[in-house]
Image (cartoon, rainbow, N blue to C red):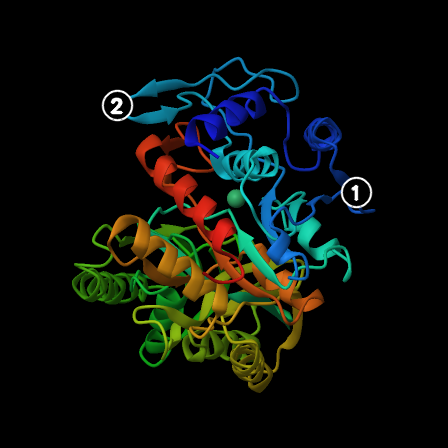
């Protein structure tokens, strides 16, 4: 297998529509490819495809298969004003300074390059054990393929996931997650006669991804707003009329608003306190989140307030609940093992909903952090519900496929690859549910700007990735 051939196949793939949920043309291409090579192929009810190549090394006839895995779909994003129909137009790309780049759309190297590498291996004359190539669907929109996978669909006990983005790094673990939703039913309470309205706004925080960025000590504006409200309740008698902050469950809250009703004459005291608070906040976050700021303005009040009892319990819970890293990995330096993101607080009807999102690479630790969050909101009298759980993949540094992949890398390139895990989801976590004994690793060439227009693939890293994968398949199950 050569990187030139992998690139040739990838160029073919760039012309095949494969938006998540619409992978049919890609699936047909894979099945036709298998037929052309005379290889057995099957598709499950979910849409996942498996192509099998029997052992070509006679000495490895009785060795379990090695599974090579990539996902069929791609994220379809384009720049504003660009004419491009992802359901039929081929992706346009250029080769520039050693990179393959799609300037106005996503390139789909995530994970088209993984598919191309699988197909190049299948058609190659590499002597190997049995190879099973697994192509899942809809990875980018919820990992539906991995979720729908049935035990027994493949037979291998070792899986190489080809959906990583940093050449020279071997991934051996990922986080699982669950969301915990708390809801407070409140009683609308009349605003006190003559009260003045004040709107507080925290904004300008960087936010970021609740997995990748949770250890960056960025400002969570929802929690910081609650902190101010908690402190201020000791000084100024206010009614809480509105609180609204954050957005998606997997994003750190960049903005939060609150509207308070105070006795006439108390507005300036409140605004002065808020300004002092913002000053302290910007000093606290001067390094990790320097643009966070806030403002205070007078507003007219048009709705009822949240009853004082509920408002007090809500604010206390938002202050008490853990946000950020709870534990670091003991095996992998620098890896966040367990975290919580206090994602959002929203009001609708007479309900205030708080969304939080827990992650951990250790399944039992994920349950524990979810328990802590649930307990905190239950103490505050909220109703609590867990949603959208997905399992993690705990790093196993004694893994055989890790040793094999590491040794192959060192022998080829003369330097150590980095062994890492990520605090975000990969399909590997879901595979473990159905195939608990699976030994896994994930690696790939260097991609940048994935999921956005301008996505690019570094060609020099593709050369190394292809050499490495070729060597791993050749050596499997061991040298
Ligand atoms: Zn991917």
Tag 2's secondary structure?
loop
Give the image location of residue 467, x and y in percent: 40, 42
Give the image location of residue 470, x and y in percent: 46, 44
Residue 24 sits above or below residue 401 on the image: above
Residue located beneath label 1 in the image: 43
Q: Is the C terminus in the top left, top right, bottom left or bottom right quadrant?
A: bottom left
- Residue 60 sits in which quadrant? bottom right
Give the image location of residue 417, x and y in percent: 31, 57
Q: Are marks 2 and 1 in contact (CB under 8 Å)?
A: no
Q: Nearer the viewer, residue 376 or 425?
A: 425
Residue located beneath label 2 in the image: 97
Q: Nearer the viewer, residue 155 or 162?
A: 155
> Which numbered tag is attached to residue 384?
none
Tag 1's secondary structure?
strand
Q: Residues within 10 Å of mark 2 (few under 14, many from 20)?
A: few
450 relative to 22 in the view: left or right = left
Q: Nearer the viewer, residue 123 or 68?
A: 123
Residue 327 sits above or below residue 141 on the image: below
Q: How many marks?
A: 2
| Residue for point 51% across, 47% down | 162
On the question of residue 195 being in view, the answer is no
Give the image location of residue 105, x and y in percent: 47, 24
- Hey, which residue is sitting farthest right in the picture? 45
| Residue for point 31% across, 64% down | 265
- Going from the N terminus, do you reach mark 2 or mark 1 first? 1
- Residue 438 sits in which quadrant? bottom right
Q: Nearer the viewer, residue 9 or 18?
A: 9
């Amino acid at each position: 297998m050569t990187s030139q051939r992998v690139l040739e196949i990838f160029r073919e793939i760039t012309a095949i529509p494969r938006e998540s949920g619409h992978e049919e043309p890609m699936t047909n291409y894979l099945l036709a490819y298998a037929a052309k090579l005379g290889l057995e192929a099957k598709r499950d009810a979910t849409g996942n495809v498996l192509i099998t190549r029997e052992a070509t090394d006679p000495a490895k006839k009785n060795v379990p298969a090695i599974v090579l895995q990539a996902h069929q779909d791609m994220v379809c994003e384009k720049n504003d004003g660009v004419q491009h129909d992802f359901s039929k137009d081929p992706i346009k790309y250029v080769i520039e300074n050693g990179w393959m780049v799609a300037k106005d759309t996503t390139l789909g190297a995530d994970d088209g390059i993984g598919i191309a590498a699988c197909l190049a291996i299948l058609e190659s004359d590499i002597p190997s054990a049995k190879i099973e190539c697994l192509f899942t669907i809809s990875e980018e929109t919820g990992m539906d393929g991995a979720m729908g996978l049935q035990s027994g669909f493949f037979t291998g006990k070792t899986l190489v996931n080809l959906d990583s983005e940093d050449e020279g790094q071997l991934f051996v673990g990922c986080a699982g997650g669950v969301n915990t939703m708390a809801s407070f039913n409140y009683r609308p309470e009349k605003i006190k006669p003559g009260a003045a309205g004040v709107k507080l706004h925290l904004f300008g925080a960087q936010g970021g991804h609740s997995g990748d960025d949770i250890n960056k000590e960025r400002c969570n504006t929802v929690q910081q707003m609650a902190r101010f409200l908690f402190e201020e309740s000791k000084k100024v008698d206010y009614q809480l009329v509105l609180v609204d902050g954050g957005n998606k469950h997997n994003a750190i809250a960049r903005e939060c608003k609150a509207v308070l009703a105070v006795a006439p004459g108390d507005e300036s005291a409140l605004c002065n306190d808020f300004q002092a608070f913002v000053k302290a906040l910007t000093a606290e976050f001067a390094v990790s989140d320097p643009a966070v700021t806030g403002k205070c303005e007078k507003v007219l009040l048009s709705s009822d307030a949240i009853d004082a009892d509920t408002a007090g319990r809500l604010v206390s819970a938002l202050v008490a609940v853990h946000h950020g890293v709870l534990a670091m990995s003991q095996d992998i330096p620098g890896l966040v093992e367990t975290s919580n993101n206090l994602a959002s607080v929203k009001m609708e009807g007479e309900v205030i909903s708080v969304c939080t999102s827990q992650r951990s690479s250790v399944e039992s630790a994920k349950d524990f952090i979810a328990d802590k969050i649930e307990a905190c909101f239950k103490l505050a009298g909220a109703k609590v519900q867990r949603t959208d759980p997905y399992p993690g993949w705990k790093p196993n540094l004694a893994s055989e496929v890790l040793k094999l992949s590491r040794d192959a890398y060192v022998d080829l390139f003369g330097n150590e690859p980095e062994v890492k895990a990520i605090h975000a989801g990969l399909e590997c976590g879901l595979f473990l549910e159905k195939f608990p004994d699976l030994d896994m690793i994930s690696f790939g060439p260097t991609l940048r700007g994935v999921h956005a227009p301008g996505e690019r693939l570094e060609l020099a890293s593709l050369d190394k990735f292809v050499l490495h994968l070729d060597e791993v398949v050749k050596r499997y199950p061991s040298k």
